[in-house]
Amino acid sequence: MELTITSRTVDPFTVIEIGGEIDVYTAPRLRESIVAAIDDGQHRLIIDVQKVDFLDSTGLGVLVGALKRVRGDGGSLDIVCTQERILKIFEITGLDKVFGLHATVDEARAAHG
């Protein structure tokens, strides 16, 4: 399965939309995209995983690493997800307590009011 990554700005946030599978093979591409955004000065990220079909521990590691980087710069990283099977992964790992999980990009933006 292919991994698609697109990025757009919804001031003051950068929304990174991901589709496909995030696994040991595709996670490095995701990491590169997120690091590039952070290096460009984007420290308020919303990661939209609505079109993700599969997420493994390598992908979770990329998201946790990105969260640590943006928080270190006073930023934020929120996740947009309504898929039960992906939400379950966050719940089982306890990461639902670490990430802000939201149903929509607008909801994620509003959480930072």
Image: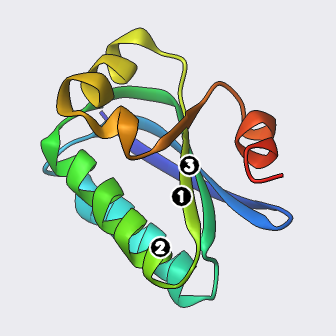
What is the three-letter code of the residue carrying label 3?
Asp
Badge 1 element: strand
Residue bearing the label numbered 3: 78
Q: Nearer the viewer, residue 69 or 38?
A: 69
Q: Position of residue 90 (x, y in %)?
A: 31, 30
Contact between labelled residues 1 and 2, with CB atoms less than 8 Å apart = yes
Q: Nearer the viewer, residue 7 or 2?
A: 7
Q: Residue furthest top?
A: 84
Residue 71: numbered disc: 2
Contact between labelled residues 1 and 3, with CB atoms less than 8 Å apart = yes
Q: Nearer the viewer, residue 16 or 43?
A: 43
Q: Residue at x 43, y 82 (%)?
A: 72
Residue bearing the label numbered 1: 77
Label 2 vs label 1: CA separation? 8 Å
Q: Residue at x 57, y 64 (%)?
A: 76
What is the three-letter code of the residue carrying label 2?
Arg
